[in-house]
Image (cartoon, grey):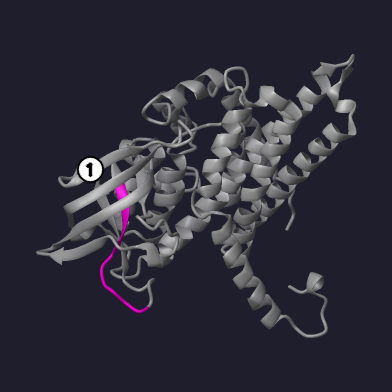
Amino acid sequence: MDFALSEEQEMLKKMAREFLERACTESLVREVERGDKGYSPELWRKIAELGWTGMVFPEKYGGTESSLLDMAVLYEEMGRAMFASPHLSTVILCGLLILETGSEQQKAELLPKIAKGDLVLALALTELDPSWDASGVTTRATPNKGAYIISGTKLFVHDAHVADRLLCVTRTRDSAEPADGVTLFLVDARSPGLSYTLLKTMVGDNKQCEVVFDKVRVPAENMVGQLHKGWAPAASAIQRGAVMLCAEMAGAGQRVLELTLDYAKTRVQFDQPIGVHQHVQEHCIQLLASVDSSRWVTYQAAWKLSQDLPGDMEVAMAKAWTNEANEHACWRAHQVFGGVGYTSEIGVLPIYSRRGRAAQSYLGDTAYWRKKVAGGIDGWVLEMPKGKPMGFWQ
């Protein structure tokens, strides 16, 4: 693939950076961290007017049919600016899932509202055992007189407290194969029997909830996709979301690199900038390597998904690598900044570090995705034609 951005993507990148530099200021980032919502409703409205909430949807639903690679470009700029919003929950995780597997009635009703910024959705997936596989789904949906009764507890549900609807992943039957028997339902966020507890996290703008479903009644027509066949679209949503998180971490790493280089050039000790020291230069070099490698492995995964090509291995490699690369990049930056790098009151590096740590855990941590990479490597070894060097085998 050609890693160069198209003219349209370069324009999107430039427009997004200029807008976020004006609108998503450091003071706003700190204000959102201290607030209860986890995002700025005013800024959410502005990005909806720019078309960011509808980019990936077809024109008939109010979108512009942008690709996931386009979205990766946008998410990189979001990460660079520390922009917090329910965009990932609403558009990427839930909106695209509805577009992929929802009924025409559901798409016609919900997608235009998402595109206009009038609807916030949250994906209710993980439970007491926070697995990102179908085996972790135990919340039960039981048929009852033309409806389903949902009972169970969902944990670490991002943006649930501000959502209008929840896309709940439930188990509708037991099976030897965990993926068989998972069904998706749209649930009104104010339904009787639903209760929310806001969890305390290390990142103020990363709002997560415990959501308890106590015999919540959901109409049968709120089922998204087919009965018992909901895991495949849910897994696709996780992949798309994981790639966007990678793009966000790459963008954050780019800004951390810029801040670190500037500090190394301007911080003077013993009458010379600290950047002249080889030890400091080593940290900067390794930081650059972490950021650039994250960007390219992320774009490769986004391109694969954009082209509807098999991308399981690329997504797994991107999330496994970028999780660690982001952590290493922030660590390198802290070594250059020293003690001042841990002082939130006068710098933003601690915010980048904390946000990165949250992104590393969401939608699968490093161990989860490494396991998938290991499985993919095993498949490659078994299928690789004899006599061909692995580096040239495709």
Front-most of 171 and 61? Answer: 171
Residue at the spot x=28%, y=74% of the render? 174
Q: Quadrant of residue 11?
A: top right
- For the question of whether residue 317 can be seen, the reply is yes
Residue 184 picture location, percent across and down: 31, 60
Q: How many marks?
A: 1
Specify start and end residues of the magenta stretch as a single range: 166-176
- Residue 167 in magenta stretch: yes
Q: Is residue 1 above or below residue 201?
A: below
Residue at the spot x=47%, y=56% of the render? 238
Residue at the spot x=67%, y=82% of the render? 382
In the image, what residue type sits under mark 1? Ser
Q: Is residue 314 above or below residue 162?
A: below
Q: Quadrant of residue 262?
A: top right
Q: Residues within 10 Å of mark 1 (few under 14, many from 20)?
A: some
**Image quarter in which the C terminus is found:** bottom right
Q: Is residue 135 left or right of residue 211?
A: right
Q: Is residue 84 left or right of residue 254?
A: left
Helix or strand or loop: what does disc 1 sit on? strand
Residue with the mark numbered 1 = 195
Residue 4 picture location, percent across and down: 74, 47
- Residue 17 in magenta stretch: no
Residue 155 picture location, percent across and down: 35, 49
- For the question of whether residue 67 can be seen, the reply is no
**Image quarter in which the N terminus is found:** bottom right
Q: Quadrant of residue 300?
A: bottom right
Q: Is residue 311 left or right of residue 211?
A: right
Residue at the spot x=46%, y=44% of the render? 88
